[in-house]
Image (cartoon, coloured by chain):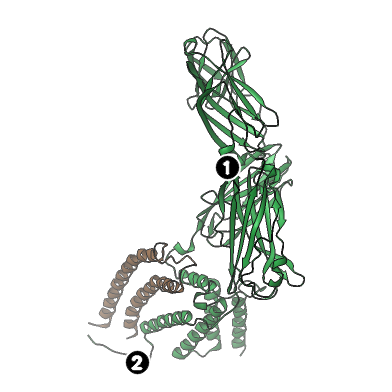
Chain colours: A green, B brown
Amino acid sequence: MKIRTKKTCLNPFWALILVGVMIMLTSISMVSAVGIFGSLSNWTNFTNPGSGLDSYSFSNFTTLNITALVSGEASTVQQRLTWKSYNSTQDISNTKFIIINSSITGKSIDAGRAYGPYRSLSVCDAYTDNCNNYTIPTTEMAGSCGGEITNSSDDGIEAIGFTIPNDADKFYIMFKIYTQGACAPITQDAMINSIIKELYFSSNGLFSLVDNTYSLPFLNITFKDESTSEIINGSITSSHWTIYSNNILNNRTILYSNNTEHFSYSFGFLPKYSATNLTYSINYKSTGYAQRTFGETIQIDNSTTNKILYLLKNIDGIYVTFQVINVAEQPLSNTHVTVIQGDSTVGDGYTDTAGSITFFLNPDLSHTFTFNATGYDLYTTTLTPTQSGYTIVLGATTTASEDYQRGIGYSTGPAESTLINRTDYTFNFTTTSSYWTIESFGFRLYNASGTLLATDSSTANGGTVSSVVNTGNLSIIYMDYYWSVDGNYQNATRYWKIFNEADSGWSIKNFFTDLKNYTDDEIFGLTAASRAILVFFFIFITVGVLSYKFGVTSPGMIAVMVFVLVLFFDVGVGIMPTLTGAVTHFITIFMALILIGVFIWEFAR
Amino acid sequence: MNNNGQLGLAIIAAVVFFIIGFMVVNFVMDEVTIARGSSALDCSTSTISDGTKLTCLAVDWVIPGLILSVIGGAGAIITAKLLL
């Protein structure tokens, strides 16, 4: 084999190796040039270890802590709040929260950008989003403007009593901290961030049996023998309660059972609760009597509803099964069936997926049966149930129900279904109506574990509500949005999956993304400004070496090389600095103009 | 072997180099994913040490560097024969 060499031309293989070595050397120089360059970085968000849903009991004084850690500009400011609840009457409306400790430590950096004396607390009704707002006194922060706040503490100075609006048993607390707009006088500037902590009162005290001394019972249940109308003892084998106030989205479900037989049960809320709607279903029985089921929806007010539940002795009744079908002989599930004997409701329930429901009834007496299925006319019949089974055929209804979505337009944002982690997004819900008058609308954002992230609502007749949320390291964000028309709530849920860029593959973009994030975190003291200077050196050295090795002396070609590198770093991988207030990718546009100018000059020459 | 034969041999060698190179890249991909994951370097977390971040940046370069090397090497084998 004849081997020839050519020494005058640069071997492409070694040219590639040379470029690779240059890139590696530049990378090493970038991370080794620590501490040389410094600049101010942006404020970062709160670390919020206290966010989440907490059970909150009234039985004792309770202390809550929220620590807001704010870091940025070579300093760390820690805001700590501690408050206690005080309640002597077991009544939510009398609950007071008192801040017993509020301290701020750390230091501010420059005038006009100190962490503010502006801190506020809002206590909001989780059902209506109505808030009571409080501003934390700021006198102890007066010396912070433009200077250091080294271990400043105002323990015990602040004492704010704040109450829960609308006596809500479920509420949330928002703590907000603002940047300082100016020093003299101190003004409020943009909000840095907020913490939302959602709380609810313990359900342990929601029901009190018989001896309810704290709250007026909203429901009294008494058991009677169906045949003799005598009061008898009964037990509740299981029951399912759903309570809510203004927004059915915020309902609470409670399960209750009591196998001890009493002649009556009295249900009230402990402490006092502002829920206004109750849907319940009770399975009840007594010794020698067959179990029965009863359920209904009632309005809760300041009065007591008395309810008599009838039981029938085992020897006096038979089990009767009704199957509800339509004319196509399809079983109709979830059909509401009530059975009345005389003036007493002796059976109540919903058909199962087979369209069937079974009652324990007296075969010697006449009963009135009512069948109510959605989309079908109400059907009532009277019969004496001597057989073990009956089939009820329902015809289609002739009346149309109200369409509460008529003329309603709505949209949610962000438009994309996949979001990037550690990024601020404006979540919004927009609704319009050309037919109905929208009474209220809003949304709530949750993470995968159900923790409330943000909420916004409005009572206007349509419009947009929005909230900015940082995706952080979340995997998914859910939005429950709703609107209310004529007292009826329409709601839906949308979700966004959070895409972690770090797991996106093995692209070279990973390197630049990490480099950008790490320099934002000031790795080895390397900052955004240092990064910009290193990028400049990289472009300068690369173009210089290529020009020297390949003899490229044409201004046009050099301008092309510089433009391509700037385009790559600015648009391609996004690590070029952004000039405040400038056009997006201004540096690339500027280089493009220079390139065009050089070409025009070359051709004109 | 004449010039055409040498060029053909170079092309075959380049293809073999290319295939073997990308097989190696394929093997390394999973390892890079594991190395960058939360159970190892945890590169997507900002609270890791500066030394770990530096390691992450180096790991980020492994796959692109290998791909560049494979493409560059295969291209160099063919181009070298064309220029000789």
The answer to whether any part of residue A426 appears in the image is no
Quadrant of residue A216 in the image?
top right
- Location of residue A417 with respect to A339 vertically, above or below: below
Tell me the kind of residue under disc 1: Ser
Residue A194 spot, x, y in % from top left:
63, 59
- Looking at the rendered image, the quarter that the N terminus of chain A falls into is bottom left
Quadrant of residue A3 in the image?
bottom left
- Location of residue A479 with respect to B60 vertically, above or below: above
Q: Secondary structure at mark 2?
A: loop
State the residue at coordinates (48%, 18%). A287
| Mark 1 burial class by Cα count in 10 Å: few <14, some 14-19, many 20+ | some
**Residue sitting farthest toward the right:** A185
Q: Is residue A240 left or right of residue A171?
A: left
Residue A359's mark? Answer: none
Q: Chain of mark 1?
A: A
- Location of residue A218 with respect to A581 vertically, above or below: above
Residue A381 spot, x, y in % from top left:
59, 14
Q: Is residue A476 left or right of residue A272?
A: left
* Between A390 and A91, the one nearer to me in the picture: A91
Residue B72 spot, x, y in % from top left:
37, 77
Tell me the kind of residue under disc 2: Lys
* Between A82 and A595, the one nearer to me in the picture: A82
**Residue sitting farthest toward the top:** A364
Residue A236 spot, x, y in % from top left:
52, 26
Q: Which residue is under mark 2?
A: A7
The answer to whether any part of residue A284 appears in the image is yes
The nearer-to-camera label among 2 and 1 is: 1
Dot 2 or dot 1: first in sequence order is 2
Q: Which residue is under mark 1?
A: A202
